[in-house]
Image: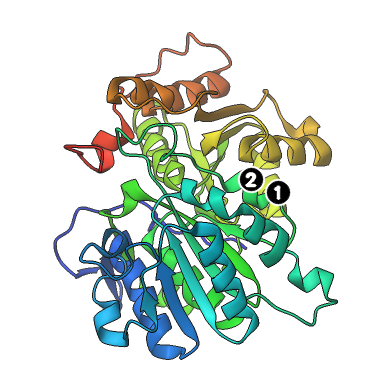
Amino acid sequence: MSCNTAMTLPVNCDDDVVSNGADTEVQVISYRDALHRTMHEALRLHDSVIIIGQGVDDHKGIFGSTIGLAQEFGLDRVMDTPLAEEGMTGVAIGAALNGLYPIQTHIRADFSLLAMNQIINLAAKYKYMFGGRFEVPMLIRMIVGRSWGQGAQHSQSLQSLFAHIPGLKVVMPSSSQTILDTYPSVIAEYRGPVISFEHRLMYDLNFQIDPLLTKQKRDPFGSYVVRQGNDITIVATSIMVLEAMRVADHLAKVAGIQCEVIDLHCVSNPDWNLMMQSVEKTGRLVVADTSWREYGVCAEVCRVVAERNPGCLRKPVVSLAMQPAPCPTAKSLEDMFYPDLRQFANAIATLVHGNEEHGIQLPDTQSMADVYKRFKGPF
């Protein structure tokens, strides 16, 4: 499913509403507030919804996304859990099997590793093992912990691990719009387990929300063209969609290079036809993911191109992802661990012009943690 919109880039705006130059008004809402809105509306509209997780009822409320919900809807629907991820995931699966809709939160995606047996061997397989007679409708929110100082055990982006498992849907919202398009639809209509990876660096960002676009019911498991171009295709996930839009704007201004940017969004069930149409048009492909290259989203995108139409590529695919090592704790090392905008721009310029001596002005190197949120400490 394709949706061409410029709403993906965050905006700097203190107002709640801005004009879009037409008869409708464009709302501005932060990533955090979009999450809070969807959690609130899920509890208000569906008596079966419960929210469970470590810290969902405290004063920080999962980085602000569940603040006040326990006070409004009660502790029997918004409840804290002990440090027992496997047991609590088992409780959530049992609740789903008995008519409730649990929304389980992991304040770090890494913590879900303690519940892998429940997620992979039970939630993903119940429907298959019992001939469709049992369903496990639930949403598991996992937060990618990158900022700085998170280290090796609090910063992993594990989407390809879960996307590998039949029976799990895995989404990576890249904006407030995609949250509002995805969560309500999934909670109201989809009868299986969904895992969502939310990037912590986006929580404070404001995004434009067009009411007309919101009313158009998009596929919650779709992929979206967020910028059109003819020179090169960028397939990206999560916050790398924002980086792709930034690099596309820069290269358009300084070199006239027009990048087509695809938000993969649902990494377990991408719209491969949409992606192939773009790659066949541009002949060049860069894949930008929030995890490692090896055996991940980057590798899967390359596999599909190689199987479907490798001859459409004028140049080999370039992948941008984390370095093949655990994440360092020191910020100076972490900045080298993740790709930056300069590397991104250089990869595209080299592909389009055919050599590394392209002479195109590159943006300054700057850590995403400094661009999107300035941290004073690791938490």
**In the displayed structure image, the side of residue 119 where residue 80 appears, left or right:** left
Q: Which mark is residue 164?
A: 1
Give the residue type that dot 1 points to: His
257 lies above or below 174:
above
Give how far across and how far down residue 247 sits, in percent: 40, 34
Across and down, in percent, residue 197 comes to: 48, 54
Q: Is residue 168 left or right of residue 20?
A: right
- Mark 1 burial class by Cα count in 10 Å: few <14, some 14-19, many 20+: some
Count of number-bearing discs: 2
Residue 240 position (above or below residue 255) = below
Residue at the right extreme of this rendering: 131
- Quarter holding residue 24: bottom left
Q: Quadrant of the N terminus?
A: bottom right
Comparing 29 with 1, the one in front is: 29
For image coordinates 64% across by 37% down, the residue present is 296
The residue at the point 32 percent across, 63 percent down is: 55
- Label pair 2/1, CB-CB below 8 angstroms: yes
- Secondary element at image label 1: loop
Q: What residue sits 23% from the left and 69% below the top?
A: 19
* Rendering coords of residue 295 (x, y %): 68, 34
Residue 161: mark in rendering: 2
**Which quadrant of the rendered structure holds the C terminus?**
top left
Q: Amino acid at mark 2?
A: Leu
